[in-house]
Image (spheres, rainbow, N blue to C red):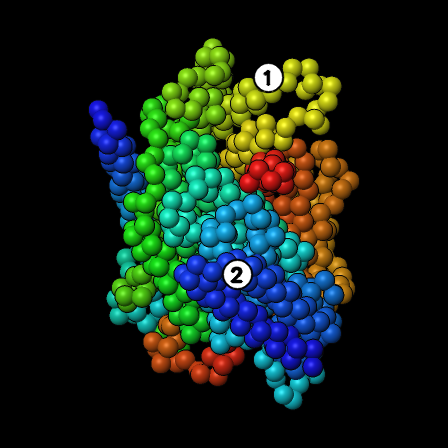
Amino acid sequence: MTRKQTRMAAIFAGLGFLVIAATVALTALEDNIVFFRSPSELAVTPVAPGTVLRIGGLVSEGSVTRDGLRASFEVTDLSETIAVTYEGMLPDLFREGQGVVAEGRFDGYGVFVADTVLAKHDETYMPPEVADALKASGKWVPANEAEGVR
Amino acid sequence: MIAEIGHFVLVMAFGVALVQAFVPLWALYRGQSYGRFLAKRAAQLQVVLLAVSFAALTYGFLRSDFSLVIVYANSHEAKPWIYKFAGVWGNHEGSMLLWTLILAAYGAFFAQRSLALPDRFATMVLVVQGWLGSAFLAFLLFTSNPFARLLPAPFAGRGLTPILQDPALAAHPPLLYAGYVGFSMSFAFAIAVLTTDQPSRDWAKWMRPWILAAWIFLTLGIALGSFWAYYELGWGGFWFWDPVENASLMPWLSGTALLHSALVAERRDTLKRWTLLLAILTFSLSLAGTFLVRSGVLTSVHAFANDPERGVFILAILALFTGGALALYGRYLPRLSEDRSFAPVSREGLLLANNIFLAAATMTVFIGTIYPLVLDALNLGKISVGAPYFNTVFGPLTLPFIILLPLGPLLTWQAGKLIAPINGLLIAALASLLVVLGLWITQAGVPLIALLLIGGAIWLTLGALADLAQRLRPYGWQILRQPWRLPATAFSAPLAHAGLAIMIIGVIGASMWQSETVVAAKAGETMEVAGRQLRFDGVREVEGPNYQAEQGQISYLSGPHKGKVLLPERRFYQAERGQTTEAAITSDISGHLYAVIGEAVAEKRVLRLWFHPLVALIWIGALLMALGGSFALRARMSKSGQGAA
């Protein structure tokens, strides 16, 4: 083979490898993406029990009850509400009335069983998903936004 | 007044950067010789001006001058001084000022050290630094002025987000930025190579120390960030595949590829085009990282609420520099001399394979990070791509990478003759396979890929030792008699490669064999974690400098730590109205016992306890990699100091 041919062969081998890697990556991606749904979206199009998804909104005032390690609460975008249970340690800034994102799945009775609960890290930061969910439900308070800049 | 001086010199620095960006170019075009002198002086003046500006902002923070918006928003009188200082870059504006200061420092350092480089080449590097400086100073002045005033001045500040009040987090951004911004140098070199007729063949040699410096800083910065997340967030993990972590991992992966391909370009005058492309892309990924963190498009630990206007500005800078550089790349590439050929199985061949793997790894991280953003931007739904994706893809990518890696240094350049005894390699391979087999028999339920990776890591360690032996062979007994006289370069690659192996063992150990217990315990209750008997003694109130804390006490009842206590805390920061979890960690040779306390439930207390086996190896491995890098850099610096550059 001439030098040029060798080089072309090397380039194609490299590209071929990258294509294979990309295919593997995209397949893995397909199996591992997690959709985010707001309470209002779920009220219109429910998700089958067992499907992993993320939900987000505000923790409803007065909804948190605890029983040992088990916490139950409601997540709302101020027009629709979802019942959530979580077993384990809730994050530092988990509070009634504050934004929260939970990842988990619905059981057969419409209760969302969370594996992880993420709360914001300081009092003025609102997870963008939650802000968008509130905006979509028309309950976004612009005063929050002014606060949210910092 | 001090703040006005800071603002004023910042505007001056912008002017100087503009001069540095364009006037020397005009001089080059006209064939006049003042260009280099001017560029050098401008680079030096710029760093002085920016240092003054940075000092002025620091003064504002230390004095708690709440008439400055960012001091008001990110600081508080009651904060310890070290966090007032670190607060300078604990916010958007200040951290971007630090970014430009580091950029200018690299430029000035280059101006100082580049005396032996040809005029045209050195001038072009400084001109590119001038472009970058102008762009980022414009960004700072027009969208993110750190010296904006708030009148009348409030009496108290709002404080720094409590999780950022931590020594590791004080050092994390400067290290990370020194890494990101360091790749601007290899970027500038690439542009200078592309825009010079018949560039000297030594360009890769000139470029390497700068790549090394940036790579070392980035390695340390990422490791420190991961360590901070491990003990401060209280989630017990060391890497979350969070988009912002990924944003720093991408330039690290492609920077590692660049480090190795530049070595080939320097020694063998081949892979030059690929090296230039990597130099451009690595800095683009650094800019993309800055964009992802600073634009607020991400939900993550780092997602500080931000102004979309800033995101658009950084995106424009990113598009301009990447697009411009790639256009130059396409236009001027044919000017480079032909590459030298080499056998597929040779040191060059294996370094090329290393580059392909690293490029593939960069690409998979890129896909997983960008895909959710693209879907969201196109309104196709909100998704998140989590750890399972990255773990699925990274295992199969890492395994062949670390199997091939040790062979590279043990093959000669070009012809690819093996320089280590073949029997030794076979024994090493056999030993690694035996370890895998032994683990496979004893550790049911652990995925095979994890065991294979451990075997690969052992193979990699043995390979690094063989490489070291090979490099030290010519020195004979001097190894024992005068070890300090041995050349630093002999240790660089073996240390870095062994560091990677150690890190992999730590990652697999901590992910596969960790055990976790969550309990709600009354004071006096006992529990067992990973074979260790523990007792929860109760909670007391503790007063910190600017926080109150609930401190739990957990005692060891058995084992080597008997009598010791763990003191995890929950801290409440009054001024910031925030809260943090301080994990308590007992470290020994087998791993970390990691304890966190949660909220009170009736008269009980939620406790979360982990045992993370071998987890410290992750950061020890990263330190070894950085150490290996600095050995290589030291050898390089002393060489160029002799005027060889």
Task: Answer with left or right where residue B48 lies relative to residue A19.
Answer: right
Which subunit holds the residue at mark 1?
Answer: B
Name the spot of residue B115 as percent of width and height, x first: 58, 48
Dot 2 lies on which element?
helix
Tell me: B603 left or right of A131: right
Residue B224 has which mark? none
Q: Is residue A114 above or below residue B628?
A: below
Which element is circle 1 on?
helix
How far across and how far down the image is residue B493, in percent?
A: 54, 31
Is B312 in front, or is A146?
B312
Query: What is the three-letter code of the residue carrying label 2?
Result: Tyr
- Residue B473 marker: 1
Toward the viewer: A119 or B335? B335
Query: Which one is nearer the viewer's eye here, A11 or B288?
Result: A11
- State which quarter of the image contains the N terminus of chain B: bottom right
Residue B633 image point, x, y percent: 59, 39
Q: Give the letter of the chain under mark 2.
A: B
Q: Is residue B470 above or below residue B181?
A: above
Residue B591 located left or right of residue B309? right
* Quadrant the C terminus of chain B occupies: top right
**Alpha carbon separation for disc pair 1 and 2:** 50 Å
Neighbour tally class for label 1: few under 14, some 14-19, many 20 plus, Cα within 10 Å: few
Q: Residue furthest top?
A: B423
The kind of residue tagged 1 is Arg
The image quadrant of residue B261 is: top left
| Residue tagged 2 | B34
The answer to whether residue B186 is visible is yes
In front of the other: B452 or B269:
B269
Question: In this picture, is B31 found above or below B388?
Answer: below
